[in-house]
Amino acid sequence: MHQRDSDLNQQGSLAPLGIGLAMLSLTSVLAILASGSLYLTERRLTTVAESTAIAVLIDAKGDLSQTLTPLARRWLDQAPLNGLHQVELVEASSADLRTVRVRLCSSSKPIFANYMFSEIGRVCSEALARRGR
């Protein structure tokens, strides 16, 4: 069989295409892992904020007019902070004397320390605990 000229001109290497697809796949995996890590940090921080708000509500014994920050700090000093770094108590308050609001922030370390765009970020979470009648 005789090959046409257009078939001869389309000869080339598939290596650039393969390398490009590999880089795209690797970038996608890195982005998914980084976002998953950030999500888990936020969920852990929310769990700690919720437990702190409930603990403050219990420790206050119904008197939410007092300063709630020391109660929250005492709980945070005892609470397990697995996977969280530099947890900071931003707010522990009660605006309506029925609801405790706790806001926490934590530094978020990247999962790939040597990654070019790795930088420590800040993740914040807020929780409310409301007292019954």
Image: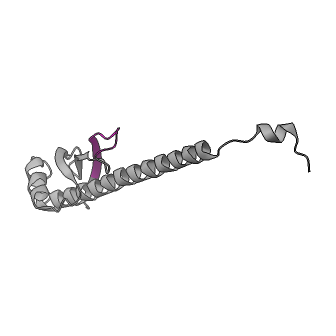
In the rendered structure, which segment of residues is drawn in magenta?
114-127
Q: Is residue 87 visible?
A: yes
Question: Which residue is nearer to you in this view: 55 or 86?
Answer: 86
Horizontal and vertical percent position of residue 118: 32, 41
Residue drawn 29% across the image and 48% down it: 125
Residue 51 at what x, y percent from top left? 22, 60
Membership of 116 in magenta stretch: yes
Query: Which of 31/45 is in front?
Result: 31
The quadrant holding residue 116 is top left
Q: Residue furthest front?
A: 2
The residue positioned 16% from the left and 57% from the top of the image is 56
Where, by quadrant of the figure, is residue 119 drawn?
A: top left
Q: Determine whether, in the image, residue 33 is placed left or right of residue 50.
A: right
The reply, left or right, for residue 35 in relation to residue 78 is: right
Q: Is residue 122 magenta?
A: yes
Q: Is residue 13 left or right of residue 57?
A: right
* Residue displayed at 28% across by 59% down: 47
Q: Quadrant of the C terminus?
A: bottom left
User: Residue at position x 56%, y 43% from top?
Assistant: 20
